[in-house]
């Protein structure tokens, strides 16, 4: 079917499941830190706005965290089911790294999550804040170990191969492999940026509906400050990450650039747009800027970037895909920087919360961070091909011996179940976002805890089923858009 083989279906299945999964940890990482900041600000200023926002976003965090845990379990099982040869070859490295993630991050998060979600009126303020901080730290520790494992697959070191299996010889070298620091910073920062635009989009949606209060304004203000500061930092981190990739995975960079061959001693141009053709070995309809490729990738005007034709055809990544996935990521990054700068200009003019063109931009930029994360992961993972462990094991040699029919059935089942289960979860989470934060009327401590209406004992009971009052506003906003 469509010229696909069982290996292709295994890769599609893994890409499909990880594309769903990565969205939830990204928001979890950002929201956990956001909640810690909100509670810290409330404890310092006693401004009820921060407390109200904490209760609002903690419900969304709970739903998102649950979906992230469920989707993450599937990823772990696939290593043994669809990629058993990879597990046999590199399990001595990847297995312990994933175990460290469970023993440190997951246990830390699980241990304090209950206190964070249900202990607002049960424990002291200091202990509750400490629990929130521990959950936030746990999400970052989890990112540390997951990125250590994945980065080792990109730039492996600290091992030797005995009887066809990877045997660790230096765990420090394995964990802190050459690409790990850049990829860790890039992913963690991406999670913060994605969460900022998610929060900012939520605030913009409410402001466009005419729901203007201190909590909504604080949401937009904090989100835009984060975008203004962190989005440019992400661009700088990305530049360093690119230089590291050029050093250790030059074929990936050549594929990203759609660069097929160097001409004499000429500097490498930057191809803005085009269509890399893997069969014809050229980039069609290329729009080039002379010298800029060398300037960006080597920080000089005369050095050349390695070209795809310098590598055997069987060792070349699919340039057609990574060329465009990279440009989607970078294009959205520039839009994020522009949004942050525009927000600063409006802030100075005191029109940040009333400029409808800006609010519509902020609304539509809501999923931009998550889309950029997906595009970045496609770039780095497809760009690693045809290797599952770069330079050591090919993807074709890593899959289990399943038939085409078996992979077809499981892939269809995954698609149906994922869209049904996580589609419902995402829909519920968006419903919580549409309700907006409830404003406490000057009370020292809000109603909460088990049996109270403000903070239900069960996170999934947080949304009120009677949302008819909001329906008219939803229709009006839809017509405006």
Image (cartoon, rainbow, N blue to C red):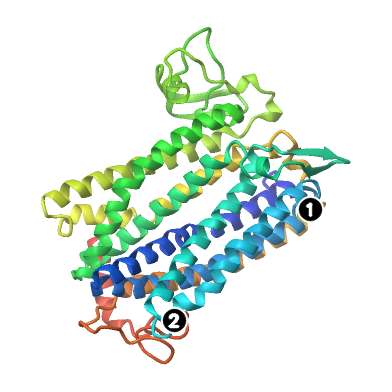
Categorize mark 2 by other alpha carbons within 10 Å: few (<14), some (14-19), many (20+). Answer: many
In this orientation, which residue lies closer to the viewer: 67 or 141? 141
Give the residue at mark 1: 84
Left or right, 330 with respect to 358, comes to: right
Tell me if label 1 and label 2 are in contact, CB under 8 Å.
no
| Quadrant position of residue 389 | top right
Left or right, 393 with respect to 288, comes to: right
Residue 399 position (above or below residue 129)? above
**Helix, strand or loop under label 1:** helix
Residue at image position (48%, 78%) is 115
| Quadrant position of residue 101 | bottom right
Give the residue at the far top of this rendering.
264
Res. 24 in view: no
- Where residue 445 appears, as percent x and y from the top left, is 29, 83
Give the residue at the far left of this rendering.
349
Give the residue at mark 2: 119
Residue at image position (77%, 59%) is 406
Residue 457 position (above or below residue 2)? below
Q: Closer to the N terminus: mark 1 or mark 2?
A: 1
In this orientation, which residue lies closer to the viewer: 177 or 472? 177
Res. 222 in view: yes
In this orientation, which residue lies closer to the viewer: 279 or 65? 65
- Where residue 47 appears, as percent x and y from the top left, is 23, 72
């Amino acid at each position: 079917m469509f010229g696909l083989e069982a290996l292709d279906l295994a890769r599609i299945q893994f890409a499909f499941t990880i594309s769903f999964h990565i969205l939830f940890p990204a928001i979890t990482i950002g929201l956990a830190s956001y909640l810690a900041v909100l509670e810290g600000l409330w404890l310092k200023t006693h401004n009820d706005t921060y407390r109200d926002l904490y209760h609002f976003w903690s419900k969304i965090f709970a739903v998102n965290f649950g979906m992230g845990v469920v989707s993450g379990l599937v990823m772990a099982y696939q290593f043994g089911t669809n990629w058993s040869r990879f597990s046999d070859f590199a399990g001595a490295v990847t297995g312990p790294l994933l175990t460290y993630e469970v023993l440190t991050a997951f246990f830390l998060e699980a241990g304090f999550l209950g206190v964070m979600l249900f202990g607002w009126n049960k424990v002291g303020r200091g202990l509750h804040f400490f629990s929130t901080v521990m959950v936030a730290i746990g999400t970052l520790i989890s990112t540390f170990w997951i990125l250590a494992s994945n980065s080792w697959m990109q730039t492996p070191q600290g091992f030797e191969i005995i009887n066809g299996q990877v045997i660790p010889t230096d765990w420090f070298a394995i964990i802190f492999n050459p690409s790990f620091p850049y990829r860790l910073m890039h992913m963690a920062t991406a999670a913060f940026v994605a969460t900022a635009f998610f929060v900012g989009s939520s605030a913009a949606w409410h402001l466009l509906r005419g729901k203007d209060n201190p909590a909504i304004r604080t949401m937009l203000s904090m989100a835009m400050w984060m975008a203004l500061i962190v989005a440019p930092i992400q661009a700088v981190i990305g530049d360093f990450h690119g230089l590291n990739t050029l050093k250790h995975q030059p074929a990936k960079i050549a594929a990203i650039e759609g660069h097929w061959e160097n001409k004499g001693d000429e500097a490498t141009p930057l191809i803005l747009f085009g269509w890399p053709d893997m069969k014809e070995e050229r980039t069609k309809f290329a729009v080039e800027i002379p010298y800029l490729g060398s300037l960006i990738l080597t920080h000089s005007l005369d050095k050349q970037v390695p070209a795809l034709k310098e590598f055997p055809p069987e060792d070349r990544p699919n340039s057609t895909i990574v060329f465009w996935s990279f440009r989607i990521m970078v294009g959205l990054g520039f839009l994020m920087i522009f949004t942050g700068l525009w927000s600063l200009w409006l802030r100075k003019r005191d029109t940040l919360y009333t400029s409808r063109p800006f609010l519509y931009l902020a609304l539509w930029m809501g999923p931009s961070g998550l889309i950029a994360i997906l595009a970045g992961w496609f770039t780095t993972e497809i760009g690693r091909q045809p290797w599952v462990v770069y330079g050591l094991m090919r993807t074709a040699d890593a899959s289990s011996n399943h038939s085409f029919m078996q992979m077809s059935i499981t892939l269809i089942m995954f698609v149906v179940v994922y869209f049904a289960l996580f589609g419902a979860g995402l829909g519920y989470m968006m419903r919580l976002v549409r309700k907006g934060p409830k404003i406490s009327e000057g009370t020292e401590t809000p109603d909460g805890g088990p049996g109270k209406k403000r903070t239900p004992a069960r996170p999934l009971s947080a949304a009120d089923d009677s949302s008819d009052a909001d329906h008219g506003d939803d229709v009006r906003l839809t017509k405006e858009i």
